[in-house]
Structure formats: structure tokens, C-alpha cells
Amino acid sequence: MVHLDSYYFNKKRVLVRVDFNVPLKEENGKFIITDDTRLKAALPTLKKILKDGGRIILMSHLGRPKNEGEYEEEGKGENKFSLKHIVEYLKEHLNTEVEFVENITSEATFEKVKKLKRGEVILLENVRFYKAETKIDNENHTEFAKKLARYGYVYVNDAFGTAHRKHASTATVAEFFDKKNRVCGYIMHNELENAKKVLEKPERPFVAIMGGAKISDKIMIIEKLLDKVDSLIIGGGMAYTFFKAQGGKIGSSLVEEDKLELANELLRKAEEKEVKIYLPKDSLAADKFDNNATKKPVNNTEIPDGFMGLDIGKEAQKEFAKVLKDAKTILWNGPMGVFEMSNFAEGTKQVGEAVIEATKNGAYSLIGGGDSAAAINQMEAGDKVSYISTGGGALLEYLEGKELPGVTALEG
Ligand code: AMP
């Protein structure tokens, strides 16, 4: 795979797939970017290409347009998913001309691309406004990818967040470029390198923390991690399925009835592989799913009827912190409770503090995207952990050992 730094982009037309899937908010008829993390992250790759004297043709998706592209007229989507809302941001941060192009496939667009000057940028409309982008069995899929491909002499993929999708702009398009002209962007490279740090020869003890709502989403990764980690901390809503599976009383806490047997199976496998599993001994329970609910500290095997565990309790916080204190490698994915509600955010915060402390003492800590990244950012501690993945689902699939089509396509 060609690294961005080993490529000189001078005069070249560079087709770049980025992840500009940012949250937007409508205010007085205008759409405002509410979190620019993904845009900011993409700037170094784009600046390097412009500095070399390259011409950039940018493509990205934004949100999940209606059934992923089921529009009456191809290429016309809802305003709230249009990439035109980020043109001003790009102009300001790249300090150059950025022309927005609505119709991705027209000849007029190709003419514009041909006239693009060195150091300038064309931003194509949301690729998911076209059915052929996401549906590989669509009759126009390859044709669509080919049309995108003719815009560039070289293809750069820096959208790690969608690398687990085999779409036209993330994978199929690469087939139309020589291997030497398929380049891996900085984000993509960093994400892969950091994931490798926990997958290949992690320093021990290696502790993984899994949280969030459901085990069904995380079964594969938990199974995979049992072959890698020394200890596995399980918190969040998914912990109650384990307690119920072992005959505990969990009140009205979140449970996946059809995953009880699987929960026991995972515990059995962990024992077999000599992985120590830490489940939270206690919870902060509530009489309803509400920040202002009546709260009650409870033991996790005896949660009274009418109460649900919404955060890990004090004992669990202490025990998890103790385990993390000695860790040399940490992977964290998923919150310990309903951290969006301030009264149930403490468990997640304390685990975050323990990860930060361990990092200060020399541990390598990878925060696995999504809600755990949001929790660390809420604590303004982004620089106090080793790496925060921007890749959510893509990172999880990579850690599960699955092939990422976006990465394979670059390798050729
Ligand atoms: P996930 O996307 O699977 O990582 O789940 C994240 C979501 O899990 C967050 O929105 C949390 O509010 C939710 N969550 C965490 N703990 C609990 C819990 N004890 N009960 C219900 N939801 C929870």
C-alpha cells in the first residue's frame, strides 16, 4: 500500500475519498456544522496534496440519505444531507478555491475537473445520492465507479470510517487505478497502525473494556478478544444479560433474553482461555429511564422489581480502576452506563479517569470510537489517551479480524 508521504502529487489530479459525515444543525434556514472532528482530521492529508501542487477532487457521503440513494431523480437528495454545507469550512481551512459540484456523473463535471488548477479543490455532492454507490449489485455500480475514477490520475482513500463498506467510492473505484496510484491517507494509516498495536504483540497485561447497550453488537469482538487479552471488563447495559444468565435478579434492566445462553458460553470460553472477566458488582439503578428518576445503589444480582441499572456502582468503579492501574495495553469500546444523562455518567467518567491515569503511567490506550470517544472528549481528555479512533464500526470489524474492503482495495 502506497503511503501518502512517499507520493509527490505535483500537477496530478487526485481523487480523494474522505469521511465528511459530520453532524449538521439547521438554524434560520442555514445548516451549521456542530462537530468538525472529522473535517479537522482530514485536513493534513488534503494539505499535503495541495502543498505538493496537486488538484483535488473530493468525494464523501453524509448521513444516511433515504434508503441510501432511492431518489426519483439520480443525484438529487435532501438538502440536509448535501455536502454544499461544508464548502465554506473547506475554503477557510484549506485556504484555497473550493468549487461544489452537484451532478457527479455529468460531462459538464468532467470538463470542470479537467480545468481544475493546481492547489484547487472540487467537492462532489454526496455520493450516496446515487443508488450505484452503495449497492454493488446495482447494474450501474461499476459504471458509476468508473465515472468517478476518470476524475483522477491517482486515488487516495482516507475514509477509514467507511473502510468496512464495499462501496463504489471506497473500494470499486480503486480497481481503475494502477497499484502505484492507490494511496493510503494519513487517517487510514494511523488507524491501521494503532489497531495493530493492540492486535499484534500488545504489552501485557492487556485489558479490554467493553460497554454499551447490547451484547449482540459485540459478540464477535468479545470472542476475538478472548484470544488476546488478559482481562476483560464488561460494563454498560450488556452486563445485565450476563447477570440474568447466571440466575441473578436484574429488575427491569436492559436484557437480551435470546442471548442468555450465549452470555454463559462466553463466560465458559473466558475461563477456558484463562481470561479474567470483570462484571460490575453493583449499579446505580433508577425507577425510570430518566435523568431525574429516583436513584438507588443496588447489588447487581438483586436489583428490585421496578428498578433498572443505568450506571455501574461505586464498588465496580473501584474494582475496574484497580484492574486498569496495572494495565500496559488498554482497549476501550462503549460506555459504562447511560452517560448521556448527567446522573448516570459517573461510572463512564471514572473508567475514563482510570484509563487516563494508566496512560500517564506508560500504558498504551486505544479508545474505540463512538460513545467512548465522546466520553473522553466530554472530559476534554483527548490528549491524555494514546489514540482515539474515528472509525467506530470499521475499527470493530478490523479488530474482529474481518477484511476491510476499503483497505484491501488499496493493497490491490
Ligand atoms: P453502543 O452503541 O452499543 O456502544 O451503546 C451505547 C449506548 O448504550 C449509549 O447510548 C448508552 O446510553 C447505552 N447504555 C449504556 N449503559 C446502559 C444501561 N445500563 N441501560 C441502558 N442503556 C445503556
Image (cartoon, rainbow, N blue to C red):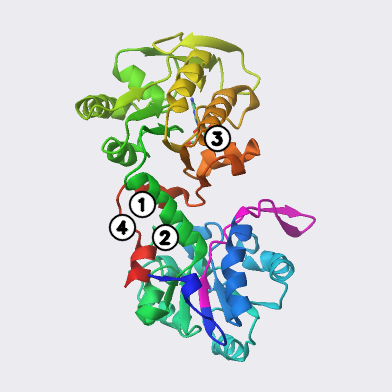
Quadrant in the picture for residue 141:
bottom left
Q: Nearer the viewer, mark 1 or mark 3?
A: 3
SS at mark 2?
Answer: loop
Where is residue 333? Give x, y as percent.
Answer: 45, 38
Find residue 163 and name its label.
Answer: 2
Q: Which residue is mark 3?
A: 360
Q: Which residue is mark 4?
A: 403
How many numbered callouts?
4
Query: Distance between the Cα atoms at labels 4 and 1?
Result: 7 Å
- In three-dimensional space, the C-alpha distance between marks 3 and 2, rounded to whole angstroms, equals 31 Å
Tag 4–tag 1 contact (CB < 8 Å): no
Q: Position of residue 198 (x, y in %)?
A: 38, 44
Marks 4 and 3: in contact by CB < 8 Å? Answer: no
Between residue 46 and residue 174, name the one nearer to us: 46
Q: Is residue 122 left or right of residue 409?
A: right
Q: Could you classify mark 1 by the number of other residues whose Cα lies within 10 Å: few (under 14), some (14-19), or many (20 or more)? A: some
Amino acid at pointer 1: Tyr
